[in-house]
Amino acid sequence: MSKNGLQPRKLRGLTIRAFAASALVLGALGLAAAPAQAAGATGYGNGTVGVNQTITATEICPSAQLAFTATYSNGVTVSAPSVYADINGNATIYWAPTIVGQITQATIGSTCSPVYLGGAIISQTQTTTTVSTPNNAKVGQATKINVTVQSNSPSAYAPTGQVVVKDVNGATLQTMGLTPGSGNGQSYAYYWWTPATSGTFTFQATYSGDTNAATSVSPQDFISATPTGTPITLTHPTTMTTGIPQTLVATVYPTTVQGSAGFTLNGNPISASVPLVNGVATFQWTPTAAGAFTLGANYMTNQGGSGSTTDPITVVSGPTSNDVITVTPAGGSTWSPNGTYVLGASSTTNFNVSTLSGAKVTLNDSGPCTSPGLAVVTPASTANCTLSFVSAGGNGYAPVTQTYNVTVGLGQQTATLAAPQSGKVNVGRTLILESPGQTDTNAGQNITWKVTTSKKICALGFPADGSVTVKIKKKGNCTVQGSAPAVPGVWAAYSVTRTYRGK
């Protein structure tokens, strides 16, 4: 220590200043060892319309409002809802691209320096189209056909544009514009379709796409249209009479299904299982008691499908009238029951038949005649046959059988001729009566020709080709006749006449 005591104090001050300087140096070294983190963002990049990108902003501006914008190559700018950073300058931004295209630059703006992000490609969202219909529809009644177009998850974009509904043959049934749904990435359309006939109908919807959503085609959907709107219908008289057989018909749709049907009365079976043929099961039932009942039909397909239907009926008692069958040969007059009629040998006669009850008629025969359907084929020789027309009755009419007696007479020969019908003919003209190679009568008999009046006016010709001709030589009437002999006991003789007037 100096004598005046000043030196120690000076040294002390130097020491303090040295310590402070050392502290500054150490502080500077400490900051250099732990530099501040630069502002930035993650989670941004290529994407799909309507699908959220979660962008995490870090170290931007504490508690500042942040705004995200993206600029496309065509100059269009889109943005995301703004957010606030926390006290550390961090924030989460949710951005769902709304349009397709190439982004050239994206920016997170704030009160401090913005953060610039790179370019990105935004692609169309894929879609799924569905057409939805009820399983069954009633003929003549409007049925709603629904179509939805869904952006594939997780896109929230509601597709725009049109959908086209077509049938199984590709014919357009309806073209509709889409209506956006409630923010779930779905749009919809619908129309009302009315089936005119029974059957199975197919629907398929095609979405045409838009700028931001891809096209898509729905799976096919099917509707079975029936008279009642159910897969099974029951056909029967609404009023029946005790003791009178009735035909019950169950029809199952589509008619291509295989399986069986059964019939019930007040829920109790009245038939065994009846196989479906082209979708139809038929059962004949005779009511035994009068009253109000519930008639039913149910079905089971080979694939396990099932269904049922019921109808109210009324059964009355009391005397009934026999059914009446009207029998009329084609081209002829109505026959009377128990009457006797002549049909030609080796001929086929078709009958037009009706009944008061509306029931179908069957035809039975005894003797050498045959009856395919409602027709009679006679033998080649004379004979006697009995024809029985049978109605099962119904609708208040009792069953009936009406018989008719048939005598098979000589068959009437016919021939197809080239000879023109009678009339005026220019003098000098030659007419063909019988063409070369023409067949003879239906009995195989040759036709012989002759001039019966005025050989001076016309003359027959017999060319080498086998034909027969007549030449008109003068003015006046010329009559020619073709004839074929009878076949004893089978065919009557054949004759045809033509009169030509030369002019």
Image: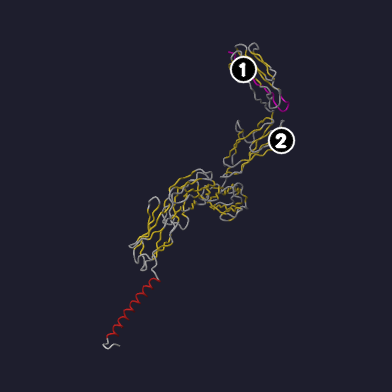
What is the span of residues highlighted in magenta in the rendered image?
486-503
- Read off the residue under disc 1: 499
Percent x, y of residue 211: 43, 49
Whether the residues at callouts 2 and 1 have beta carbons within 8 Å, the answer is no
- Read off the residue under disc 2: 368
**Foreground residue, 192 or 358?**
192
Q: Which amino acid type is shown beneath numbered disc 2?
A: Pro
Q: Quadrant of the C terminus?
A: top right
N-terminal of the pair, mark 2 or mark 1, is: 2
Q: Secondary structure at mark 1?
A: strand
**Foreground residue, 19 or 499?**
19
Residue 440 sits in quarter: top right
Percent x, y of residue 388: 65, 38
Q: Which amino acid type is shown beneath numbered disc 1?
A: Thr
Percent x, y of residue 171: 51, 43
Residue 346 sits in quarter: top right
- Confirm whether the magenta stretch covers residue 492: yes
Q: Residue furthest right?
A: 488
Q: Residue furthest front?
A: 3
Q: Secondary structure at mark 2?
A: loop
Q: Is residue 156 above or below residue 173?
A: below
Taking the spot 66% from the left edge, 39% from the top edge, the residue there is: 364
